Amino acid sequence: MTLSLAIDAMGGDHGVSASVAGAALCLKQHPECRFIFFGHQDEIEKAMAHHASLRGVSEIVHTDQVISGHEKPSVALRQAKNSSMRLAIDAVATGRAQAVVSSGNTGALMAISKMILKTLPQIRRPAIASVLPTMRGEVIMLDLGANSSCDSENLVQFAILGAVFARVIKGIANPTIGLLNVGSEDMKGTDQVKLTGEILRTHTIPGTYYGNVEGNDIPRGTTDVVVTDGFTGNVALKVAEGTSELITHFLKQSVKSSPLAMLGMLLASGAMKNLKRRADPRFYNGGMFLGLNGICVKSHGGSDSYGFSRALLLACDLVGNDYNRKVARELESLMDDDVSQVTDI
Amino acid sequence: MTLSLAIDAMGGDHGVSASVAGAALCLKQHPECRFIFFGHQDEIEKAMAHHASLRGVSEIVHTDQVISGHEKPSVALRQAKNSSMRLAIDAVATGRAQAVVSSGNTGALMAISKMILKTLPQIRRPAIASVLPTMRGEVIMLDLGANSSCDSENLVQFAILGAVFARVIKGIANPTIGLLNVGSEDMKGTDQVKLTGEILRTHTIPGTYYGNVEGNDIPRGTTDVVVTDGFTGNVALKVAEGTSELITHFLKQSVKSSPLAMLGMLLASGAMKNLKRRADPRFYNGGMFLGLNGICVKSHGGSDSYGFSRALLLACDLVGNDYNRKVARELESLMDDDVSQVTDI
C-alpha cells in the first residue's frame, strides 16, 4: 500500500533543497512513500536531479505563489489560494494525499488547514504536539502554540489527543497524562488549570491521569503526555531549546580555555557525538497538528534535510497507524460514556 | 554601618545547619552583617559551635513552631503566629532587621510577608524575581510564581520592579525590558500580554522596552529583564533547571559508555568544574519578593550552606543599595508623569 505525502516545498529557511533531500531520506525508511511537491517546478526539478531515488515516486505541482513567514494568517487564508501551502493542504482534503508537511509559516498553516480540513468531530480546537527527549525516553507535549488561551474543555481534549498518540504511535498501552502546573497540589494554578485537573481526575480518559506536573518533570519524563495551553507550552519548548544551547555554549567556552581540556574533548569526541545525537533538535523535529480531520505536520523553519525527513516520518507514523480514525473512535466512545459531561463544561 | 538580617533557620531540607553555615559564608564577604536566627535554640547553638566567626554577631530567638512545607498559606497565615518564619518577618516589620531570608514554604512566606510588610505604594502585587545565567551575562526574570494569573497592570509593575533592580543592583544604566510571549509580533499572545505590550510601548518606564521576547531569548540574554506572569515564569524556570539536568545526564551516560571518553573527561575535568560553576543553580539561588515594603528573599528549599549564603548576599545587595527606597521613588515620579494612565487600566 502506498503512502502519499503532500509536501509544501517552498517553506523554510533552506528552501526547496531541504524538502527534496528530506523526502529522499524518508523514502529510504519508507519505500512505500509517494510524494507530491508543491512549489516552483524548475527549482524542485533542479533539486531532484541529485536524488535519483525520487524519480518515479514523485510528482510536481507547479505554483510560484508562496506564503511568506511574515504573512498574517488571516491574510494568507483569504489571499493565497494558489500558494504551495494551500495547494498541499487541498491535496489532503481531496484525498489525493494522506498527509501534508510544510516548513512554512506556522500560523498560516494552522489557519488554512483548520479551514480546509476542519477538526475531528468532538474536537473544538486542534493543538500542536511534539515528541521531546527525556531522561526516561520520550514525552509527547501539547499544545505548543496553536492556542494562546485555552479553557478546560480544550485542555481535556488535548489530554485525549495526546494519550491516544502515546498509545497508538508509541505503543504505550496505558500512558500517563500530566497537567503542567506550578506545583503538585490540586489547589495550585489558574482557574482553567484547576478545573481541568478536576475533570481529568473524575472522568474516564484513555490512559491514566497522573495529576499536576511541573516544568522540570518534562525533561525528567515523569509522564508520557504533558498537557498545557499553547502559551505556556510554546515558552516551555523554547526555554528548553535555549537552555540546551546555553549549556553547549558554556561547555565550548570552558573547553576552549584549556589545552588539556581540548585534548580531553578530542578523546571524548565519540561520546560528544553521541550526546549531540541524543539531544539533536532535528531528530525531534515536527509539530503535529492533532485534532484536525487530516494529517498535517509542521517542520521547523530552520530544519535541514535530515530535520525535514523526521517531520515526514512523523506524518508516515500518523498515517500508517491510522491515528485519526483511532482518536475519533476513542472520542466517540468517550462521548457515549461520559465525555459529554466533560466537554459540556 | 551594620546590616541586620533576620534568618528563618527552620525552613529547607538541610535544616538549621545550612542556614547557620550559610550565614558564616555571607559574613566573610559582608563583615558588617549581623544575624538574628529564628528557630530552635539548641539546634541553632549546636550548629553555631562550628562557626566561631558568628559569635558576637548573632542573636537567637527561640521558637519551636515551624511552618511545614505542605501547610496551606491561608492556614499558616492565621495559625502560625509564633513560627520561625512569622517571627523573622515581624523583625523586618518592627525595624529590628533590614531583611528576612527563609528556605521555608514559598506560599506561606509570600502570604505572611504580604500581610505583615504590605506592598510598596503603587504596587498592587509583589512578584518573585531571580537572576539567571545567560550567554551574555545575566537576566532578571519575574514573576516566577507569586501570581498564577496576572493582568496588564501587574505585568507593567513587574517591568518597573525589574528595571529598577537591573539599574540599582546590576548597575545597568539603561536596562532593556522584554515581555515574554510566543512570537516577536505585537499581535501575538494572550489579551493581557498584548495590552501589556501596548502600555510598555507607549509609556515612559525606567530603561528601554525591547518588545516581545520568546522562551529561548531568556538563556540567550536578549534583554536585561524578562517580564511574565507567575504561571509561565514558574514553568520556564523549572524547564530550564530540568533541561540542564537532562543534558548533564546525557553527558554522563555518553561518557560512561566509553573508556576513552572517560579518560578524556579526566583531562577536561578542570573545564568541567568551570562549566559546573557557571551553571551552578546554587550560585543563582534566591527568589526576591520584589514590591514588598521590606526586603524578603526566598532561598530554595533544597539549598545547602553555599546556596543559602547566595540568598543572604542578595538580601545584602537589596538592603545595601537601598532598592526599595529607589524603586518607590521611581514609582512616585512615574506616578507624577503618566503611570497613572498605565495603572488605571
Image (cartoon, coloured by chain):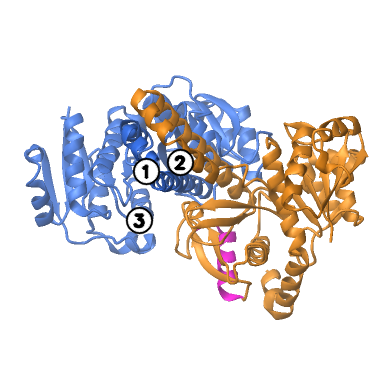
Chain colours: A blue, B orange
Question: Is B345 situated above or below A47?
Answer: below
Q: Amino acid at mark 3?
A: Ala
The boundaries of the magenta stretch are: B189-203
Q: Is residue B230 magenta?
A: no
Report how far apart the C-alphas of labels 1 and 3 lie in the structure. Answer: 49 Å
- The residue nearer to you, when weighing B79 against A279, is A279
Q: Amino acid at mark 1?
A: Pro
Question: Percent position (x, y) of residue B290?
Answer: 72, 57
Question: Is A230 situated above or below A158?
Answer: below
Q: Amino acid at mark 2?
A: Ala
Q: Quadrant of residue B10?
A: top right
Q: Which residue is mark 1?
A: A259
Residue A108's mark?
Answer: 3
Q: Quadrant of the N terminus of chain A?
A: top left
Label pair 2/3, CB-CB below 8 angstroms: no
Report how far apart the C-alphas of labels 2 and 3 lie in the structure. Answer: 45 Å
Q: Which callout, 1 or 3, points at the residue further toward the start of the chain? A: 3
Which of the two discs, 1 and 2, sits closer to the camera? Answer: 1
